[in-house]
Amino acid sequence: MGRITSSRSQLIGDPRHHSLLASKFINCLMLDGKKTTAQRVFYDALEEIGKRHEGEETPIEVFEAALENIKPYIEVRSKRVGGASYQVPMQVNKARQQSLAIRWILAAVRDKKGRPMALKLADELLAGFKKEGAAYTKRENTHRMADANKAFAHFAW
């Protein structure tokens, strides 16, 4: 169990939408302390989503729904029992769900090359909203792995 740091309580909403989730995402997107660059990429991606998405959802709602779709609910963890290691399926707590979803989205976006970051991010968020894309595939693989190892669930204590 991780320590609760003051960073959680110090997190304030992003300037435009006052969303803590968006602020957290921007902080994870940021490289080398360049927050304004990260904000510009994020807001450009939201604008791109606004242009491309046909529906009544606002871009920030699309972002939140995409993140919700990508969150894993169960994962496998290694457990040593009697000299053997088992992949034991376990529930994922809320904070870890969020951080994994953000990490997977950013990893998927950073793996794609040759286009501006905002466009790649918009693509991945729209794909996550539609329950497809690389980050969603990662989630599905995690769930599939947990399902395949259900036999070892009794080792979870």
Image (cartoon, rainbow, N blue to C red):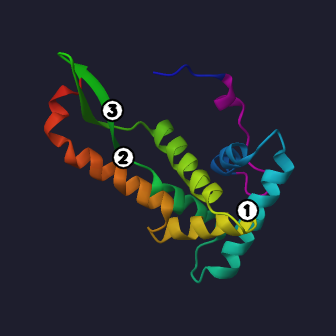
The answer to whether residue 15 is visible is: no
**Magenta-tinted stretch:** 6-18
Element type at mark 3: strand
- Residue type, mark 2 in image: Tyr
- The residue identified by callout 1 is 117
Element type at mark 2: loop
Label 1 or label 3, whichever comes before in sequence order: 3
At a point 17% along the width and 34% down the height, the residue shown is 152
Q: Quadrant of the C terminus?
A: top left
Against 95, residue 19 (above or below) is below
Residue count near mark 2 (Cα–Cα under 10 Å), binned few <14, some 14–19, many ≥20: some
- Residue type, mark 1 in image: Met
Quick check: 153 left or right of 129?
Answer: left
Against 21, residue 9 (above or below) is above
Are dots 2 and 3 in contact, CB under 8 Å? no
Are dots 1 and 3 in contact, CB under 8 Å? no
- The residue identified by callout 2 is 73
At a point 78% along the width and 52% down the height, the residue shown is 38
Residue 48 is situated, as x and y percent measured from the top left of the image, at 71, 74
In magenta stretch: residue 13: yes
Which quadrant holds residue 88? top left
What is the number of the mark on residue 36?
none
At a point 20% along the width and 47% down the height, the residue shown is 148
Element type at mark 1: helix
Q: Quadrant of the N terminus?
A: top left
At a point 54% along the width and 41% down the height, the residue shown is 99
Image label count = 3
What is the number of the mark on residue 77?
3
In magenta stretch: residue 69: no
The answer to whether residue 111 is visible is: yes
Residue count near mark 1 (Cα–Cα under 10 Å), binned few <14, some 14–19, many ≥20: some
Measured in 3D between alpha carbons, the distance from the residue under mark 1 to the one under mark 2, in whole angstroms, is 28 Å
